[in-house]
Image (cartoon, helix red, strand yellow):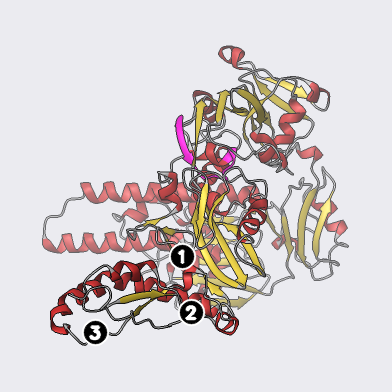
Amino acid sequence: MHTPEERPPALRCDDKAPPHPVSRMLDAIDAPARLDVVAPRSPEATSAGRPPTDPLEMTLCLARPWTHRAARSATLRGLLLALLMPVLATAQTQTQETSAAGSGPIRLRQPQGQTVGEEGTTRKADGQMMSDRDISGQRLAMGAPPVAPSDFEVYVRRLNQDQPVRRFGSELLHRLHDAADTARAATPVLPDYTLRPGDEIIVSLWGSIDADLRLQLDRNGQVQIPRVGPVMLAGVRQADAAEVISRRVAQVFRNFNVSVTLGQLKAIRVYVTGFVEQPGTLSVGAVSTLMQALMQAGGPSAAGSFRQIQLRRGGALIGQYDLYDLLVNGNRIGDRFLQAEDVIHVGPVGTQVALIGSVNRAAIFELKAGERVADVLRMAGGFSPVSDTSRLSLIRFGDRNQGRIAELPLPSALDQTPINGDVLGALNVADLTLPSERQNKRVRIEGEVARPGDYVLPPNSTLADALAAAGGLTGQAYVYGTTFARESVRKTQQENFDRALRDMETQLTTYNATRRTASAEEAAAAEASTQATSRFIEQLRKLKPTGRVVLQLEPRTQALPELALEDGDRLQVPSRPTSVGVFGSVFNAGSFLYGESRTLESYLQQAGGPTRGADRTSLFVVRANGSVISAQQKPSSWFSSEEPILKTGVEPGDTVFVPEEMDKTTFVQKAKDWTQILYQFGLGIAGIVAVTR
C-alpha cells in the first residue's frame, strides 16, 4: 500500500475544477482507481476562469485507473461504479436540462403519482381510472318509474271517466330524474367556485418552460409543481388560481405564461330529508344544484310538496324553492348551487285541487295560500278551443256523498278560493247537440237546379227553401226521382244493418248446429249451402247504407214536401230518365226504353222473361222515388188479378228485379227477403244487383 507521500496525484476530468467531497472520500480508501466528482465548466465559467457553483451541473467523472495493482482493484472499482451509476444518471439528466435552457424551454414532467387519462378521468398510480361516478360513490338509478299515484289521484281518475290525471309536473320530474347524471356532468363551473382538497386542476405553462400538468390538491390543500415546489390552493377561487400559481412559479422561472382550468372535482355530501322518495345522504357532484340533488333522491313523494322545498346550510335557512316557478314560468333563479353538508328538506304537500275536462293541461295542482280559481286556470294553460268558457263545474269532496255538483259562473267565480280536495271541470261544447231551432243547416244541392252547391241555411229551413237558395228547378228536373239523403238516417241504417248481419250469423250457426242429415250426399249439400250463405253474408258486409229518405211523391208532382232540413242533408234532383231497368234471373237483363202505357209484364217479356230458376213469387220493383212494391205483398187496390204485380204500370227510372229461386229450407230464404233488406237498410237496387251476381 502506498504511503500518502508515494500516492500519485488524483486524475481529474478538469484539472482546474476543485475536488468534490466524494473525491476526498476516495482518497482515504486504498482503491485501485479514483472517482472524482467535479463541476464541469459552462462556457461562461470557463471564459471567466471561475469554477461553476450550480450543484445541478455536477456530474461524475471516472478517473483513469492506476497502472499498478489493476487486477487487485477490479472488484472494488466495479462495486463503486454500480453504486454511483444512479447518481451519475440523475446528474447527467439535470445537466442536459440546464444546458438546454439557453436554447429552448425547459420541459417539466408530470408527477409520478398520477397520469393523465381520458378526457374527464384521472388515472391513479396503479392504472385504475377514476370517473365522475367513482368520485360520487354511486350510480344513478336511470329510468326509475314515476311516483305511485296518491289516493286523491285515484279519486280524480274515477271522476274523469277512468282517464288518469297526475300531479302537475310529475311527468317532467320523471324525465329530469332520467337526465340527472347528464345534467350534472354538463353543469358549468362558476368563477366563484372555491378549490378544496381532492379537486383536480389542469395547469398549462408555456414560454421559457413547457408543461401540461394534471394536479390534485392533497389533504393540506396543496399541489406539487415540478422544480417549483408546493403551492397552497385550498380556499382559492377558481378564477384566482392562475394568479396564485403564476406568483409561485415566478420565483424560479421568468418569461412564461400560465393557464389553469378545473379537471375532476371532488364529490360533496348533502342530506335530503322530508317527504321524498329516497331520503338520506347523497354524494353529488361539486357543482350540483338543488334540483339535481332532489331528482337524484327520486323527487318529492306522493305526500311531498312541490312548492315548499327548503335549503339549509350550517343550521340556517338560506333559501326556499318553488318547483312551480320552473314548471309554469320557466324560472330557475331559486335553483342554488350546493355546498358540502347542505340539507334539502321537502315539506308535506299543501292544498290540492284538480282541474279536468276541456282545458289545455288537465292535472292536480298544489296551491299556496291566497291562490284562486284564476290561478288554477292559468297553471292549466287556460281553456281549450272547444270549452264552455262561461262556467265551471265543482265537485266538493265533502259533498260527494250527496251527489251535489255546483256550477261556478265565470268570470265572477275566478276570485273564489278553492279548498283542499275540490275538483273543477271545464265543459266541452263540441260534443253537445244544440237545439235544432238554434242550428244553421249546411246542405248540399246537386242535379237539375240553377246553382248546384253547398249552402248554409238558417234554422227551420225546409226542402223548398233549399231549392229556392239554389235558384229553383230547371226544365229537365224529374222531381219524382229526387234522392234525399240524411246523415242521421245513414248512421241509423248502418247500425241496424250491422245488427242484422250479426243476427244472421248467429242464426246460421244455430241452424247448422241443429240440422240433421241422413246421408253423405245430404251432408255435402248442407256444407255447400252453409258456405254459400257465408259468402253471401260477406258480400252483404261490403254494402253501405245510403241514408236515403223515401219521399212520398206522386209521379207527376213538381214540388217537394215541406220537410225540415237537418245539418248534412243532401238533395239530388235528376233529369227525367227514359228507361226502365230489368235485372236478376232473366234472360236479357238491362235497361229498356220507357213507354207510358206499358206494364211490368211487357218489360219482363222484353228482357226474355224469367229463367227456369227464377222465383216469380219474390219479384219486386224499386220505384224512382225509392219506394218498393213486391209480389209477396198482400193484394191491395193496386192488384186485382191472379198475378197483380205483372199488370202494374211502370214509371221512368223504375227498376224491376227477379230473384233466383232458392231452396225453401235454406237459411237465407228463412232469414230475410229482399224487400226487407231494401226497406230497412236503404242499400239501393245497385247494391242488391251487385250482391246477387
Q: Is residue 637 visible?
A: no
Q: Position of residue 414 (x, y in %)?
A: 79, 25
User: Of 665 and 668, which appears nearest the observer?
Assistant: 668
**Would you place residue 238 above or below residue 64 in this image?**
above
Q: Position of residue 152 (x, y in %)?
A: 53, 24
Q: Residues within 10 Å of mark 2 (few under 14, many from 20)?
A: some
Left or right, 211 with respect to 394, comes to left
In the image, residue 640 lies at what x, y percent?
54, 54
Q: Which mark is nearer the camera, 2 or 1?
A: 1
Q: Residue at position x 74%, y 49% from top?
A: 567
**Residue lying farthest bottom?**
67
- First of labels 2, 1 by sequence position: 1
Q: Which residue is mark 2?
A: 588
* Residue 650 vs residue 68, the one in the foreground: 68
Mark 2 vs 3: CB contact within 8 A: no
Residue occupying the point 12% across, 62% down: 520
- Of all residues, the one furthest to the left in this rendering is 519
Which mark, residue 66? 3
Residue that label 1 marks: 110
Frontmost of labels 2 and 3 is 3
Local secondary structure at mark 1: loop
Q: CA distance from mark 3 to mark 1?
A: 44 Å
Left or right: 5, with 669 as reference point: left
Q: Residues within 10 Å of mark 3 (few under 14, many from 20)?
A: some
As shown in the figure, which amino acid type bears the numbered disc 3? Answer: Trp
Tell me if residue 368 comes above or below residue 661 in the rendering: above
Question: Which element type, helix, strand or loop, lies under badge 2?
Answer: loop
Q: Is residue 399 above or below residue 460?
A: above
Type of the residue with mark 2: Asn
Quarter holding residue 558: bottom right
Crowd around label 1: few <14 · some 14–19 · many ≥20 (10 Å): some
